[in-house]
Amino acid sequence: MNKSKLLPKSSHITIYVDVSGQHPQKTYIGAASFNTHLKNEIVKEFDKKFSEIKRKKGTQLSPSECLKVLDFLNANNVVMRYTCIKNEIWENFDKKYNQNSYWIAKIFGIYKFGLIDQILKSGQFSDCHVIFCKDNFLRNHEKVTDICNELKKANNYNFSTSTALQKGCYELKFADYVASSARKLSFSQLTKFTNLYFLECPHNRFFSKIFKK
């Protein structure tokens, strides 16, 4: 691991969040967190090392390419998190809420916040900005950010949020790579990376807060 790129406490970080898949199929969500001051250097090194891979979306990567990308990010101390919304979870909520697009956005918001919560609990950061990839497949995609902001206040976090398309925010591709790698690689392959962790399910209190209404 390149120790010069270790994420120090009280640092400025940027968290990128993207989705692989959509309701009602199994859906993976990935997050990649960069020390903001080191981000450009890491991206430049990635582009130089992976001139072919950098042109691909996560869905286009082979399993071997996924491993190469994760190994690079891990070595450069990019903090990675991923989670999965399983088919049965969608099915259970579909029965209860009749496939309403409003509650689907709520679920995405809760799971995305769960990843942010995991990253922020891993260190003390003086500043954090979260960038979500715009979920065009969601009718109420703006509700996802609203849910994250609501949970942010309820859990005493202080970070800013914005939404972007991957073509306008290059670094979102790394969150896409994390999410797609989680879909394509086995759990044993994923656990070898020390900066990559799996969130099985967000905390129950997040669901209670959002679905009490």
Image (tube, grey):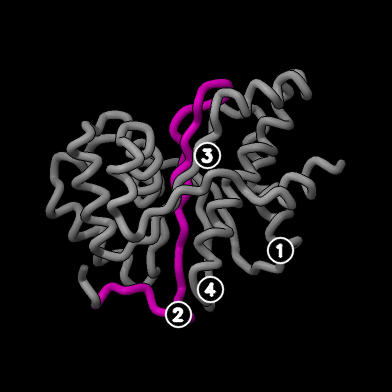
Q: Which residue is drawn at 69% across and 55% down?
A: 149
Q: Residue at x 42, y 53 (%)?
A: 197
Place of residue 194 in the rendered image (x, y in percent of width and height, measured from the top left):
32, 59
**Quadrant (top left/top right/bottom left/bottom right) for the N terminus:** bottom left
Write down the residue under mark 1: 155
Left or right for 191, reference 106: left
Write down the residue under mark 2: 9
Instruction: Point out the residue furthest to the right here.
Output: 213
Q: Which mark, residue 134?
A: 3
Question: What residue range appears in magenta?
Answer: 4-31
- Circle 2/circle 1 CB separation < 8 Å: no
Q: Which residue is drawn at 48% across and 40% down?
A: 29
Q: Which of marks 1 and 3 is nearer the N terminus?
A: 3
Q: In this view, does 193 lie above or below 212?
A: below
Inspect the magenta stretch and tell me whether residue 141 lies in it: no
Question: Label 2 neighbourhood size at 10 Å, few (<14), some (14-19), many (20+)?
Answer: few
Looking at the picture, which amino acid does disc 1 mark?
Asn
Place of residue 23 in the rendered image (x, y in percent of width and height, measured from the top left):
57, 24
Marks 1 and 4, how far apart in space?
Answer: 16 Å
Marks 1 and 3, how far apart in space?
Answer: 24 Å
Marks 2 and 1, how far apart in space?
Answer: 20 Å
Write down the residue under mark 4: 127
Q: Earlier in the sequence, mark 2 or mark 4?
A: 2
Left or right for 162, reference 158: left
Q: Earlier in the sequence, mark 2 or mark 1?
A: 2
Q: What element carries label 1?
A: loop
Q: Which residue is drawn at 60% across and 29% down?
A: 138
